[in-house]
Image: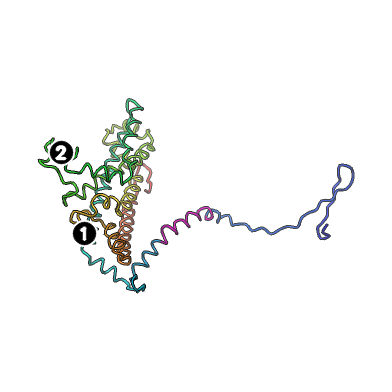
Amino acid sequence: MNPRQPLTSRPGSNGVLAQRVTAPARWRWRLPRQSIGYLFIAPAIIFLLLVVAYPIFTTVRMSVLERNYREKTTTFVGLDHYEKALEDKIFWDSLQNTVTYTVGSVVFHILIGGFFALLLNESWGSSVFRNLMRGLLILPWLFSMAASALIWSLLYQPISPLNHLITEIGLSSKPVAFLGDPDIAIWSLVAVNVWKYFPFYMIMILGGLQSIPPELYDAAHVDGAGRLQRFRFVTLPLLRPVLISLITIDFITTFGVFDIVKLMTNGGPFRATQTAAFYVWQKGLRDVNFGYGSAMSVIMLIIVGVFTLIYLRVTQKQAVYGDKTTAI
């Protein structure tokens, strides 16, 4: 026994004094209570740094460098790649196609998704039929983009059920070149994108509709509000947070479109469907000009960031619900 350990005595069961050894106090390191939360979110922060911050930093770094792979040399060129991109007419045409594709997709995603969400939110005569319709409307979302592009590429052919229907009902006297006409090719891609992803926005809006208390509709009905007035003064204000989030997410994810262009048109005809992301791929990866491709990527990132900040700034107004004022 260590002679430095203190001894204490207490009576035992047999009358004999039993000795209890008291261990010396040990120093323990404890994390401050206010820092425990940061420890829980540390994995998420590390993940974001690896998959978001590091790629952005690498892209910005590559945009100011010129790499000669034949001589294996790297030269700092500053903003030369950015100046070249701003003077590149093809890049600006690609941005215009991207904006057209993005705005068209966002508008129709919300309109069509919201329309079907309103229908599915109504009280139908049969819940079984309503659930069946929900399952059928979600089907396009289950297809991969490659499968969706293949299906619609076949439908867009001159000899196809779609063109046959168009000529039969008299909309056109000859088959429509959906992917061969520069005037409608980009909108043909928008139609595929809307068909593929509107179920997602339908589900999100339906969730927002089902979170609205029914008592508000009952109160509005008692006050004499019609169906259109209830939609305008009850549904839309309470759906505003959901719609703001969906529009922002939709714009960010759609602006970088590449897969559908590569699969269906390869940027044609006559660059009518060539988007900015597709042009970045052409210059950066196909032509092995990583510096120039990185510079165009940074410009795209700035455009998306500025739009998102302006949009959120404009929409962060106060919505007044009766006597309460709630910040959105």
Q: Residue furthest front?
A: 70
Please identify the quarter of the rendering in which residue 96 is found: bottom left
Please check the rendered image and state whether residue 125 is part of the magenta-colored stretch, yes or no.
Answer: no
Q: Magenta region's main secondary structure?
A: helix
Q: Which residues are magenta?
A: 38-54
Specify the quadrant of the image occupied by residue 24.
bottom right
- Circles 2 and 1: CB distance less than 8 Å? no
Quadrant of res 216: top left
Rendering coords of residue 88 (x, y %): 22, 65
Q: CA distance from mark 2 to mark 1?
A: 31 Å
Residue linked to disc 1: 93
Looking at the picture, does residue 134 appear above or below residue 201?
above
- Disc 2 is placed on an element classified as helix
> Taking 201 as reference, is 80 above or below it?
below
Q: Which residue is mark 2?
A: 166
Dot 2 or dot 1, earlier in sequence? 1
